[in-house]
Image: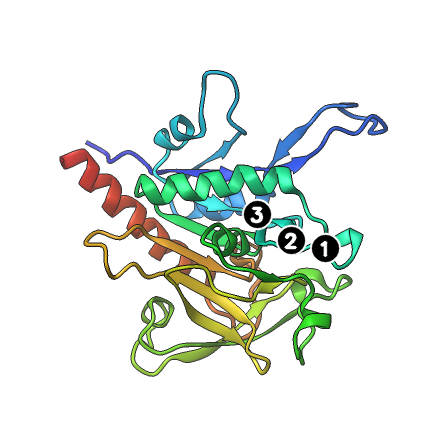
Amino acid sequence: MKAARPRIGVSACIMHADPQRPLFKGKTLLYAEESMLRWIMSGGAIPVLLPRASGVIGARELLEAVDGLVLQGGVDMSPRQYGEEPVRPEWGGDPVRDQYEIELVNLALEMDKPLLGVCRGVQVLNVALGGSLYQDIATQHASQPVHRDWDLYDRHGHDVVVEPRTSLAAWYGFPETGGRGRTNSVHHQGVKQLGRDLVVEARSVPDGVIEAVRLDCRSVDHAPFAYGVQWHPEFMQGDPIAGQLDPDKLLNAFLTEVRSRHNARVTE
């Protein structure tokens, strides 16, 4: 009998109601960027866009229907989520999406559903666990490379250094020494103070901005799996950057955790 394909919940981007929009005037739209869905499907998994909970259906029930969770990129987080006021009005973020995704993060960890955060997603994971962000790397960090170039967008990139003896180093074949690879870079905010139980797996070169984190709950016998990267691996598939970190290795590592934990629940 063929094994069922894992179902991966994808947190939705939100286009809020706009009375001036010519299509779906005054309606709220939830959507996914297609590259993300294609990337998940390339690993043999079925992506499922998760709506905001409503009526008799709560977020827990939505997550019960999937085997893992991916947090998409998108709009800034509101600095108010980590106790700051926006330095500029345009950095005020989307508190509605923040609350929706933070609830999903907390439930996924509680329910042992593997979680992967991409770009904004790593920031949501960090803030959900009590961390903070640079509202703008260019003005709040001694940053040397530019982390976002609007004209180049996902063709813009920089190198990252992968820490030795980390999950990312193992996935890419240099577990003891660590290594270096190239990623795209389309963000202006980034992880500042780490959330609880998060450890750094990679940093940008040469300024050391955090680019990848993992949850490391050593005090728990069967710790949940949560990982986040600041780059967009889904944009790198099929159109590689020279020297890039292969996006499929990251996806395969995530889906391996999804399948393992799903199988463990089935056999309990």
**Residue 113 makes an appearance in the image:** no
Please identify the quadrant where the C terminus is shown.
top left
Q: Secondary structure at mark 3?
A: helix
Q: Secondary structure at mark 2?
A: helix
The residue at which mark 1 appears reads as 86
The residue at which mark 2 appears reads as 79
The residue at which mark 3 appears reads as 35
Query: Is disc 2 in contact with disc 1, using a CB cutoff of under 8 Å?
Result: yes
Figure check: 157 above or below 262: below
Q: In the depicted view, which residue is nearer to us: 53 or 6?
A: 53
Q: Amino acid at mark 1?
A: Pro
Mark 1, Cα crowd under 10 Å, few <14 / some 14-19 / many 20+, is some
Residue at the outermost top position: 56
Please identify the quadrant where the N terminus is shown.
top left
Q: Amino acid at mark 3?
A: Ser
Q: Quadrant of residue 139?
A: bottom right
**Image-based side of 52 in relation to 110, left or right:** right
Q: Earlier in the sequence, mark 2 or mark 3?
A: 3
Q: Amino acid at mark 2?
A: Pro
Q: Secondary structure at mark 1?
A: loop
Residue 225: x and y in percent read 33, 52
**Image-based side of 129 in relation to 148, left or right:** left
Residue 256: x and y in percent read 29, 51
Looking at the image, which residue is at 52% across and 66% down?
193
Residue 148: x and y in percent read 70, 66
Q: Viewer-nearest of labels 2 and 3?
A: 2
Mark 2, Cα crowd under 10 Å, few <14 / some 14-19 / many 20+, is many
Mark 3, Cα crowd under 10 Å, few <14 / some 14-19 / many 20+, is some
Q: CA distance from mark 3 to mark 1?
A: 30 Å
Looking at the image, which residue is at 44% across and 64% down?
213
